[in-house]
Image: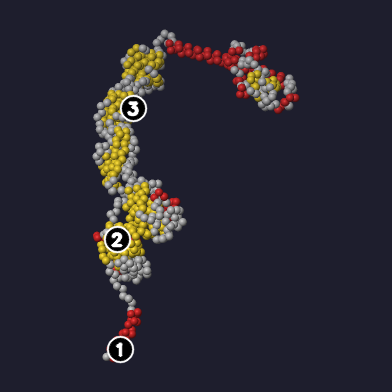
Amino acid sequence: MRRASLIALAILVLAPYASTASPVSRGVISCSNSSMDSLPSNWTIPDQSCIRVDLGELQQGESIAFQISSDNDVDILLFSASTVSIYQSEQTYRIDSVWQSESVFESFSGSGEWHWSVPSDRETTRWYLVIDNLAHPSDAGHGSQGGQASEASLEAGIITPEPFTLSDSIHRVEADSFSVAAGPFSVDEGTQMRIQARTMQGFPDIFVMNEDAFSLYSPSENWSSSSRIVSADMLLVTTERTNLWEVSGIGDEDLYVVVDNRAGPGGGGAGTSHAAVTVTVTLTPILNPIISSETNLESVDVGAQVSLSALDTPNKSEQIEGSSFSWDIDDDGVSDASGYSVTHVWDSPGIYPVRLWATSTDSRSASSTIEVSVIDQSDPVVSIGGGETIVKGYGEVLEISGWFSDNWGVDRVDWLLDGNIIESNYSIQTGVDEDASSSINIEVIDDFSPGVHIVSLLVTDKSGRSSQDDLEVSFVDITPPEILLQLVDSLPYNSQAEATVGDPVIFQISAIDNQSSSISYTWIIEQGTENEIEFIGPQVIHVFSTEGPQNVYCRVENEAGLTTFAEILVVVEGEETGGGLGALGLAIIAVFVIGIIAVGGFIAFNLAVRRKMSDIVEQEEENEEEAQTTEKPPEDVGMWGQRTTNPFQPSYEPQVRTPVEIDINDLIDKTQISEPTMGTSEVDELQSEIANLDLETNIEKASDDDSRKVRKDCSSCSDRFELELPPGIDSAYTNCPHCGSEELVGL
């Protein structure tokens, strides 16, 4: 009994200490449950209680839109199925590894909307949204601590994304920072960009900038706001805002959509507090089908294969799939082909419309049309068989064949010889690019000159374009000349003739060859003997010097080198007696006598000329000696200085005039050959006549170009000399450079 009393006393004494030493055990939070299927819902959340909404199993990339309102502060928390138990067991949950911080809003009151996307690093997971009105041991006084009941409502649902949605999620941005809502992304100019912002906390700005501007913005706190695309700005977003911007002026640069929580620019947010904003970026891509081709569609050749492409159509957002392009080539309103490209051939000239339809993935459609101008630009293709020169003789037939084709159609075919049409065909039947043939037979007649000729095949198509191919042919003579007439002393002969030693015999042949413009005749007489001789020409005269039979041959040859021979046997008899000299002998004697007379006359003439020249030379030497002995001092010594340095004459070198320099014609006109010698008076008279042959005056002025030059004939030796007077001097004395005679010259 006593022991029991002691134990009870000890318990009463130690109880206070035990209660203070043992930790308070944490209980399990029990929230009222709800599900997204039951939303929207309104709740009264008592103090120190919570609502847990089951969002179901969600796949990565799925997005949920939330709309919430509360009249008092509550905490909005988001957990996965694996971390919600940490929250409910009152463990530390305010870390990123437990809750989804981008979708957490503590001490929230009022109304708000945000979108949240399942992280891409998660497999299919169940998620829970908790509306908390509790004070937790581990929240260190952060967030709502409860204290009173709150009226709350919630609406949520899976978002079905619109086509071409680039971003649709909430972004949390610390003060003086930024977040990229979308980008970098490529977009076609002309595309409509729709930016919608829903703010849960703070007052951020939304910018659109190109790649260059973003490269300056992202690392710098002193970024210049002027580099952004001002027309796409949304400044100081305080409520839900929407901006529709048509993309322009960006070239090929990528774009960024940025949530800005920095100070500035003017009219923008201050960037001093935390911001949370949902940004939705959607595109309406431009739909503009464009037809392009490497071929110039304004000038397409008939029959040419043309490739048409839709690859130049704006499609950076992949708004059009390849199979969504369709082509109408024949302008009948029905699609003829589909895909990014199509090929077609037009087989006749004309203007052909081509239409391209494009249907985008969001079911919009558009079309465009171009006109293709088809023109015949190709000449016919012509070929003549053979290649090498064809040789044909007169009287033969020349056969030539040719092949041709055209990209549209052939109008006519002409065969030409040396540029002159000799045969034509105007009814050619051939398809596009199909080979056709034509041939011609030409009889080589005497009307054609021998030698090389050009045979041409000329083909003209329906557009008037033409081509020709040429072939060289050579017409040759294949027959020798034909001897028509043979004469000996103007009498016809067959194969034998008679002649007499010492008498001239005339041989003549006449031949014809229609294919040659000239015929050559070569005579060979007394062939094989010492007296063998050849003559050229159709007629020759020959005198036989020996008796006996002699063979006379004549080779008749045309331009082709073909020959015909004539052979004549001439029986030569002895000279006739008592008849005196023959005609040939008389002719020879006459020629001999005339030759002797001519030689004698020539010798006599030469002797007379030589005597005349000798007399003239002697007279000149006598005059020169007299001039040297009677020479006076020049009158111009006082005016020009010493005589030996006269500037108006060349250095004096007396020249002896040789007989060769005398004009023989003058001598013939003024002398008599019959007189072997002449007296002194006759020499003087001859010199005077020679000196005055070409002179009317002693002084002759030079041309206008040489106004200071003077030409003069020496009064002593009659030789002409020339000098140039200095400026200011119009006349002076000078010495003749030929004989030294002093002469007065002047202008």
Question: Are there few (<14), some (14-19), or many (20+) residues within 10 Å of tag 1?
Answer: few
Q: Residue placed at 73% from the left, 24% from the top?
A: 639
Q: Amino acid at mark 2?
A: Ser
User: As displayed, is residue 154 above or below residue 29?
Assistant: above
Which of the 4 image quadrants contains residue 26?
bottom left
Between marks 2 and 3 in the image, the one whose residue lies nearer the viewer:
2
Residue 653 at least partly seen:
no
Q: Amino acid at mark 3?
A: Ile
User: Judging from the image, what secondary structure is the residue with disc 1 in?
Assistant: helix
Cβ atoms at labels 2 and 3 below 8 Å apart: no
Towards the viewer: 520 or 504: 520
Quadrant where the C terminus lies? top right
Quadrant where the N terminus lies? bottom left
Q: Residue placed at 28% from the left, 44% from the top?
A: 365
Of mark 1 and mark 3, the one earlier in the sequence is: 1
Image coordinates of residue 213 in percent, x first then y, are 42, 52
Image coordinates of residue 396 in percent, x first then y, are 28, 24
Label 1 – label 2 distance at C-alpha: 60 Å
Towards the viewer: 343 or 726: 343
Label 1 – label 3 distance at C-alpha: 151 Å
Q: Residue placed at 33% from the left, 13% from the top?
A: 492
Image coordinates of residue 399 in percent, x first then y, are 27, 27
Question: Are there few (<14), some (14-19), or many (20+) residues within 10 Å of tag 2?
Answer: some
Q: Identify the residue at the far bottom of this view.
A: 2
Mark 1 — residue? 6
Of mark 2 and mark 3, the one earlier in the sequence is: 2
Mark 3 — residue? 454
Mark 2 — residue? 153
Image coordinates of residue 477 in percent, x first then y, are 32, 24
User: Judging from the image, what secondary structure is the residue with disc 3 in?
Assistant: strand
User: As displayed, is residue 242 above or below residue 710?
Assistant: below
